[in-house]
Amino acid sequence: MSTHDTIDADRRRLVGAAGAAGIVALLRPGTGLATEAHAAMPPAEATAGFKPDIELELNAVADEIRVLPGNATRLWRFTGRVLRGNPQALSFLDGSGHIPVIRVRRGQKLRIHFTNRLPEDSIVHWHGLHIVQRMDGHPMYAIGSGKQYVYEFVVNNRAGTHWFHPHPHERTGLQVYFGLAGLFLVGDDEEDAARLPRGEFDLPLVIQDRSFNDANQLVYLAPGMMARMMGFQGDRVLVNGSAEYVRPVARAAHRMRILNASNSTLYSLRWSDGRPLTLIATDGGLLERPLTRGSLTLGIGERADVWVDFSERQPGDEIALAAESWSPSLENVTGLQTGAAPVSGGRPIARFRVAAGAARKSVLPQRLSAFPALRLEDAVNRGRPRTVQLSMQRGQAMLNGRAFGRMDEVADDEKVKLGTTEVWEFANDASFGMRMAHPMHVHNLQFRVIERSGPGHALSAGFTDEGLKDVVLVLPGQRVKMLMKFEDYTGIYLYHCHILEHEDLGMMRNYLVRA
Ligand SMILES: [Cu+2]
């Protein structure tokens, strides 16, 4: 019996439990980890002195959405509305319509009234943003059911494709799986100057895998530690919440903002007609110049913006984005490390049908952006990187042999100094325990990848190591060195594996930026 059959059977037995309560009853992980009240800190409230340019209401709620033909699917989702400022600042993606998109400009002041209408604790993390500790959505700020947390912050980031999702301790995987994730798109003057496709020609594509039972209800992890160690892999790949994503496109250039928002699955992406992908941006925004790639491999949380021109296509032509899915365990990612990955092609996950009409030619600028240099010579530990060993054994997923402990726990070797630049190194060296790929995420900053070594590093054409990054995929046996600068804010931030089941198992630690 497969893991899915197991939980499926549980679900059928309990299918009378409706709505959110049903989700919780069925899907509390079978590991003995229960939701505790983690709200150690008082929730933030609106402050009188803060004058927002944009003010939003954002709620996490239980709902039902038609994802597959037949029964609607019970899920959790964000709802909300714009209270002040640009009415387009909050919208919902095409597809199933439950994935929100927040659109802001660099420098804008944002106030977001987040209300938790789930039957358990939650808090929202703004993935990719450079932000004060109290606004970062650390699990220490999780609020209980019915409670509100008011975010107030200035958008410091340059233009880029960021996202947001819950971050409560031990429940992130479940809450994201059941539908809580959205995009956070930042624009700025530099991006405007690059004259990239916008409006209807700017298409976000959020990739997530899911499994459904016969009643069209979501099936998450089987009980037990092993399922969590392996991570969740669904049998369907959804784009923008849709199991059959098809979109008409004009005969013109488009920007596609691709986010891997799956729990554990890695993807190699390519165009179905064999044309190369034109990569224009990664996690932290536009590259200096476009790059051409045969395929792109995205770890969880990674973003890749690609430019694609349909002007040469004839009305009625169909081009698909094809994805090969990889579970992160060693046996499965071997193909990525030996170069076997790019040949098999994958299956189409999003289809674009070229509409009738005149072709509109456009030119992709060869100069996209300039971003602040992070220089190796500025690093305070240039020759001795701060190395973080990734390992999994005996039911534990660890960073330097430690799992997440107290909410504010920081070890001596996890303290950095404000204003300094450091070299960090994620080392997936372990030859024991479970050997897996780990997409490593650092909160509060964008780093530069300066070196990748180990098996498969030379095949790195599929990795998106260029530009500014907040997630880097580290395959078994590999080491990745990054340059990062700790600017503007002191406080406690997280670094962790973005396989959500690993994060929930404690493959997450605090680091402290001190004055
Ligand atoms: Cu991991």
Image (cartoon, rainbow, N blue to C red):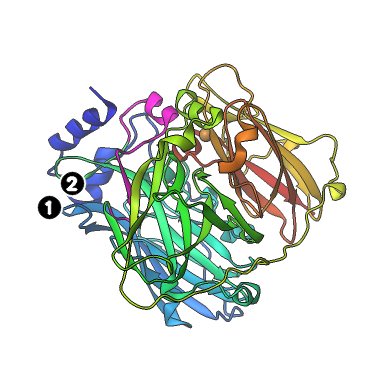
Q: Nearer the viewer, residue 25 or 270?
A: 270
Residue 46 is at least partly visible in this image = no
Q: Nearer the viewer, residue 371 or 148?
A: 371
Residue ID for mark 1: 70
Mark count: 2
Residue shown at 32% from the left, 61% from the top: 317
Q: Label 2, label 1: how many angstroms apart (C-alpha)? A: 8 Å
> Residue at point 74% right, 53% down?
486
| Of the pair 392 and 345, the residue shown nearer to us | 345
Residues in magenta, as a range: 221-242
| Percent of width and height locating residue 363 | 57, 71
Would residue 239 be found to the left or right of residue 307 on screen? left
Q: Residue at x 68, y 44 (%)?
A: 511
Q: Is disc 1 placed on a helix, strand or loop?
A: loop
Q: Quadrant of the N terminus?
A: top left
Would you place residue 363 above or below residue 330 in this image? Answer: below
Q: Residues within 10 Å of mark 2 (few under 14, many from 20)?
A: some
Q: Nearer the viewer, residue 21 or 470?
A: 470
In the figure, 195 relative to 29: above or below? below
* Kind of residue indicated by mark 1: Gly
Residue 180 image point, x, y percent = 38, 54
Determine whether 111 is above or below 234 in the image. Answer: below
What residue is drawn where x is 37% and y is 28%? 227
Q: Position of residue 278 (x, y in %)?
A: 54, 57
For mark 2, what is the residue?
A: 216
Q: Is residue 302 magenta?
A: no
Confirm or reject: label 2 Cβ below 8 Å from ligand 1: no
Say whether residue 33 is left or right of residue 375: left
